[in-house]
Amino acid sequence: MEENESMEPSFGEIVDLVKKYEESVKEHQQVFLEEDNYEQIIQFYLDNRENNKALRVIESALEQFSFSSFFYTKKAEILANQKHFAEALVALDEAEKLDPNDINIFLIRSDVALWEGRHEEAKSYMDYALTLTSEPEDRCELYLELADIYEDQEKYEEVVVALEEALRLNPMSEEGLNRYWFCTELTGKYEESVKFHEELIELSPYSHFAWFNLGHALAGLGLYEKSLEAFGYVTAIDDTFDAAYVCSGDVLYNMERYEESVNFYLDAIKLSKPNKELYLKTAECYEKLEEFSKSRSYLRKSIGVDPYYDEAFYRIGETYRLEEKWTKAVSSFERAVKLSKDNIDYLAALADAYMSVGEGELALDIFEKIFQLDTQTKQNWINLATAYFNVDNYRKAFQVLNEAELKYESSADIFYIKAVFYFQVGNRHEALLNLERGLLTNFNEHTLIFEMDDSLLDNEAVLQVIEQYRS
């Protein structure tokens, strides 16, 4: 009769073992356990982040099994993670005496050297450890450590080479695949990524992570249809892999196929935990579809996850702006600005909303603040001048535009704006002069004056000057 039942203890059995061990320690009774029982208790404590308890168990285990390299290695690992490097190295020396071919010893030595910035030493440990084993799983782990070393040095091409070696040994390594995707995003080497993942899929056709990375790389190259096909394979292999639905939604959003995009986001929402970014993506789709009420519904869900999510308040304001519900827009923009006081996009949106509800002085205060934060953007000069003009401070408005004219030479839009303002204050001579300067600089931009003041469409003098400069 075949033995099919696993000999591994259940979680309940390990909990009972830990309880018995703790009772014995509490009663000051001498503890005698099998070696694997000690290992199980140590792992239990480590899983529960009780490192000091794990160290005490290791000391007890070493009293019984003083020739076990495993306990010395595990002790070194914990001490290294606690940054007790000198003590960790002492434990590793003991472990190496007992088992000089244990690659875990060199992995920990490498970690210690890496933490202390000794990259070449860390690399030498990995080079040596690779001579000790031919086991694919072990060699994969060593190459992942090499990738860590190169990443710490910001040698991303070497990181990619190390990750490729690791993944050829273990095409299903989630850590390796995740890190490869990160490196591809960082370096932008999408073509190389496509080639490698196609090779990897030949080795392991059912690796949904490999298909996922392939989809990302294809999207990076702008091959959106092929990218969607790759993400489709991901969900065919694992229909609970929510990230593939999100990425499909992102690709479709970039293709302006918003109805399809939102359906993928909704599928992802069903599979994932509440996620403020995913709710935001969904809301943005509904905004594009002009379903503003639905958009706000998902934005409020994102605020439910994070009450301080400034971008969600801003986007709620944007939906109200698009509906020209300015009072509600003001309220939402104010909350966004309260959470992110120096965000220029939020401030500009709030200032425009104040303008639209007739609060010119409040708008001016904000445009002045924006200008203080950023004097390099031409639009900030124009907005500030317009704000002064709207509160009848014409002198300051023209002063700002004159300074902008000097800063941004040959900017036709500044001449056209000055022309409109001069017409509106009744200075026909200066208005026509600035109109001519604008037409000489860039004739094609002259429609700006009609966008600002459509009454100029009936102004004979304006139309005559424009005709004179029409080529």
Image (tube, rainbow, N blue to C red):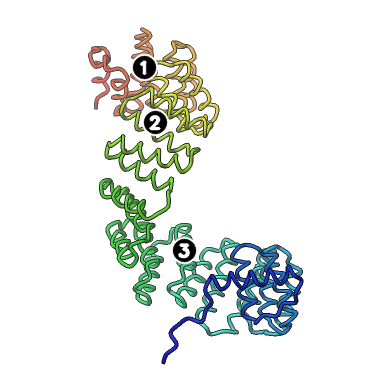
Residue 355 position within the rendered picture, expressed as x and y whole percent measured from the top left: 40, 19
Mark 2 — residue?
317
Q: On the picture, is 84 further left or further right than 325?
A: right
**Residue drawn where x is 34% and y is 18% of the image:** 435
Residue named by callout 1: 419
Relative to 194, 260 lies left or right: left
Q: Secondary structure at mark 2?
A: helix
Q: Nearer the viewer, residue 379 or 469?
A: 379
Q: Are marks 2 and 3 in contact (CB under 8 Å)?
A: no
Please state which of the two labelled residues, at mark 1 or mark 2, is closer to the viewer: 2
Q: Nearer the viewer, residue 169 or 307?
A: 307
The image quadrant of residue 80 is bottom right
Location of residue 8 with respect to 427 vertically, above or below: below
Residue 132, position in %: x, y?
60, 84
Which mark sits nearer the N-terminus, 2 or 3? 3
| 237 relative to 265, above or below | below
Say which residue appears at 53% left-offset and 70% top-offset.
11
The answer to which of marks 3 and 1 sits earlier in the sequence is 3
Q: Is residue 303 above or below residue 108?
A: above
Q: Quadrant of the N terminus?
A: bottom left
Amino acid bearing label 3: Asn
Residue 386 image point, x, y percent = 42, 19
Q: Amino acid at mark 2?
A: Gly
Label at residue 178: 3
